[in-house]
Image (spheres, grey):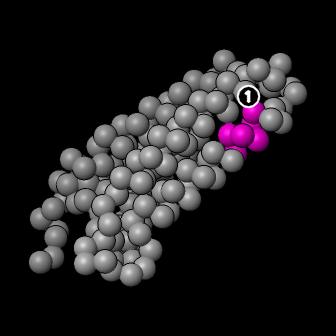
Amino acid sequence: MTFNDRIFGVLLIVLAVAYGWGASQFPEPFGGAEGIAPGTFPTLLAVVLGLSSLYLIVRPDPDNAWPWSRTGVELIVAVVVLVLYAMLLEPLGFILSTTLAIGTLCWRMGAKVLNAYLVGAASGVVVFLLFNFALDLALPLGLLSFLEVS
């Protein structure tokens, strides 16, 4: 039943096109600064997603079925967590929303609750520090904006 992979592939192509279009809407750097444009990485991701989607359509798995068991429920939970993560990123800030998202996903994969959220918190802080200080890319602080250094 290769029909399922093809449906999924078409949906992912639609997502890749929308994502690529969104990436093309980023404004150019002020003053014609040289280097990598802000939309370069998202555009690259859209291309990879589009090519992967085409592969699903052209060469679907001959033995696939939609996971309507516990696995299907876990996939739906993961999608809901990621959508909520995107919605809460600005108001809660990167560190808190990342802690909640990664912690919840780790917990759903079988980690103990405390360990899951400790991993989420550590991940949020490390990635925040990496982006803000090593890569000089600002991430939203949200509720933790009192930590902002002027």
**Residue drawn at (25%, 59%), measured in percent from left and top?**
140
**What amino acid does circle 1 point to?**
Asp
Residue 1 seen in the current view: yes
- Label 1 element class: helix
Q: Residue furthest front?
A: 32
Which one is nearer the viewer's eye here, 20 or 85?
Answer: 20
Total number of numbered discs in the rendering: 1
Residue 26, given in percent of the width and then of the height, sits at 34, 57
Residue 58, given in percent of the width and then of the height, sits at 80, 35
Look at the picture and state if 81 lies above or below 95.
above
What residue is shown with label 1?
5
Residue 127 belongs to the span the image colors magenta: no
**Residue drawn at (23%, 60%), measured in percent from left and top?**
141
Which one is nearer the viewer's eye here, 100 or 63?
Answer: 63
Look at the picture and state if 49 lies above or below 65.
below
Quadrant in which the C terminus appears: bottom left
Look at the picture and state if 145 lies above or below 6.
below
Horizontal side of 95 relative to 41 (left or right) equals left
> Looking at the magenta stretch, what is its main secondary structure?
helix
**Residue segment shown in magenta:** 52-57
Q: Residue furthest right?
A: 62
**Residue drawn at (63%, 45%), measured in percent from left and top?**
50
Residue 82, given in percent of the width and then of the height, sits at 44, 40
